[in-house]
Image: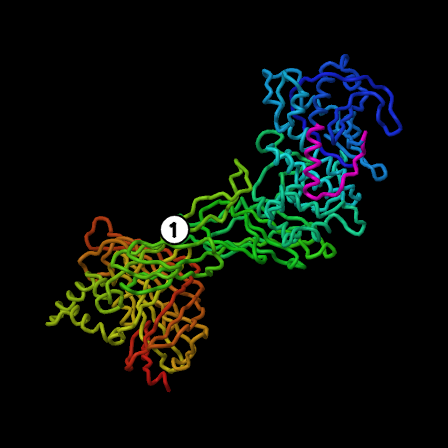
Amino acid sequence: MKACYIALLAGVLHVGSAALAQDTTEDGLRDTGFTVANDAFAVKCNSATIGCVSGELGGFEARALEGYALLVSDMAKDADAWLSSLGFPTSDLERLDGRRLIRLDESAVPGAAGYVEYFGGTAEMTLPTSNATDVFSASGPEPTQENAALGLSPGTIAQLGDLAFQIDRDVYGSLSGGVVAHELLHTRLNGLDQVHWLEEAVARAVGNAWNIRRGFSPRRPSAMRLDKPFDDKSETLDGFSYGYGKSAFLRFVGRETGSPDRVGYLADFGKLNDPKMHGIDYLYERMPQGWSFPEAFPRFIAQMNFRAPRDFGPAGTWRAFDSEQDLLYTEIASPIIRQSASVSDHEDILRRLSTFAADPVLLEYVTLDYDKRLPEHDRLMLARISVELAPEPEKLRLVFEHKVIDGLEHSYLTLADGEFDAGYVRVVNVPPSPDEAATYSYTLRVGFEPVDIEVPACLEVGEEAQIDLVGFTEAEADNLYFVTSANAELDGQKIVALAPGPLTVTAVIESHRTRAPDTAPSPEPYLWPDREVELAPSRIAPAGGCSCNQEDILAIANPRMWGALDQIGQAFGTEDMPSDTMAALLPSLMGGELPADHSTGYMSLQAGPRTMRGEVCVDPLTTGNDRDTTILSLYTPSIPTLTGSFDGFAVAHTGWGGWPANGTATLHLEVPVAPQDLEAGRTYPVQLAGLQRAGFFPLFSAYSGTFYNFIPWQEAFTGDSETVFPQAVAGTVTVTEIADGLIKGHFLLAGTGLHHEIRHWLRAGTEDTFEFKGTETAIPVRATGRFAVAIPDRSTTLMRAGNFFRTATINEKQE
């Protein structure tokens, strides 16, 4: 038995005449009662109700029944010809006087809008008499012929005559069109019981396609239950198949492949009576080229990227079978995930996946906690979603929003911004053949990692440089692109400096979410606004303006430091000002004049929740005293740094090279390889060098406040200062290139440190007594960056981090 749900909607009409009938013949047809016929179909009212047997006594019911019979005969003729044109198998429908017969009768299937029963090889198609009063009503708007047209033939319209009623389009389209095509298809298939679910899916798809062809809406969708086996053969308590809900998949395939009326390809399934084939076999073996179930089902799941909850919108938006939570799925997982944006972490979600099904996980309750003091470019996060611990991962597909992912891992760039919707994930079980189908348990891993995007703090006019992605690759964030200010050109991640001035590079993060708002569910991709994040400040300088040289050091040296030196010199009666002497020594303190093609390095330092970054000076290639190690020194310009000591107050600037105002950064690295043994393409372990390894020299310092004209000048200060000292810090250095007098590479270090925060003030009631108090906090530290180290042409000794190091000459390197 084939059956479809009745649509409980109101309709409208009056027609006339019926004959008397009481007895039935051997084939179940009453020998009296009215019949409406055309050259192809006969519609016989075969009920014992008064409306069917007497036009005079039946009143409105009789007139509605005859009108409905006229509509059905007209629709059946057209729909049957259409099914033949698409190539569906020949109909087995019983005949009356040479015409195919449709019966109007009391329904033997409660709730069905029509059904087909087979007796031997002959099909009987019955439409309930109650359909007539759903389409027609005893009262309605003013009569009009146009209300009855609706694609009917002129002959049928003439037979209906002047109508004092209106036909409801949706009810008419369903019960006089879609249902007729649906049931007529059943008379052509006669599928085996084992494929009944598929036959109902095909018939519902065909009925909807017929409605759409005629300009009507498809029938109200049934729950799709896509998280249950697609070939679910069970039925509802009312005896209806879950296959109705699968019709949307069949129409999707037809639409995507350009099949006639979206269902023409289904004719290739034949009569669905091959005893060797189960329902799912047809979806593997008889689908259009490139659209077998393992190929088509993940695409369908991706397309159906929306939510239609059971309680959303007006009643009857979709038809539930049982207790389905959503139109597409019986149940949707919505885990709660909370993570700090300052660390890499993940959540493992244990899941179970049925055969030929999709497992939905909606990541709508994700929170990334962040330090609200941080700028947006320091809150960048890479989201990673992956399927883990699946016993046969090759049989699974990962779907994210509207995308079928290549592989079982997906990532995208986002911003730590509190609570957000991290996307809709579906894992799909599509074995390469039905025989390999199995139910699987797996782990869905959802994680977030802090990442960085670095822009050179300074570029010289005509220079080209790359935007560096730190902690991720371009392929891992296909929702990212860049725009830049007008004084530079941008080609992907390559910047070309055109004119001096501030350089603004903006990271444009396209929304990872393409699902429409839940207030207006739709399968079509929704265009959410992009997020624009301005990266750390940068600048373009004239040629030579980005060098780390004597002028830079003098430009940001604290004037109060120079004044204090000269005060001391004057007190001792020196003729030459100490500040002039110190300035004259700067070239030698820097290791001699650096080669002309020397380029500065770049460093990013994360201290606890805070991230600082900018350009740095890089010493010429240096070696340890034993000549068995290589020393790399990177620092912001500071005279104490160049003399092997430290003083965080020795600089005064509003933000040199991208670093915070009055900031000083220093990193001295020791590589356990002699300079002459370094090789391009190799990665080496690295630790801090000199006394910085022991924690005596900080990684970073900064201050804000006011200096007074006293000595010691560093103590004559009111305001705030901070210093980050290393504790246990180590990592790696990678040498990427050795050529043209330069060694280029990048580094990554991580570990722990101590953050000192100090408040300085002038004691109340005094003019020259300064006091301070501070706190010490253990924090995680992380440093990344790149360098271009010049190979010097002469040997000299440098003082760095409390040690003496010799520069490694070209001759030494070539030995």
| 180 versus 655 height, above or below | above
Relative vertical location of residue 479 with respect to residue 688 in this rendering, above or below: above
Q: Nearer the viewer, residue 727 or 521?
A: 521
Spot the residue most to the right: 26
Q: What range of the chain is rendered magenta?
A: 72-97
Q: In the rendered view, does 489 fall on the left or right side of 545?
A: right
- In screen coordinates, is 158 left or right of 802? right
Left-right relation of 243 to 617: right
Residue 515 position (above or below residue 56): below
The image's colouring method is: rainbow
- Decide if residue 312 is in sight here: yes
Given the image, on which type of amino acid does mark 1 rest?
Val
Q: Nearer the viewer, residue 452 or 408?
A: 408
Residue 86 counted in the magenta span: yes
Q: Quadrant of the C terminus?
A: bottom left
**Residue 218 falls in which quadrant of the image?**
top right
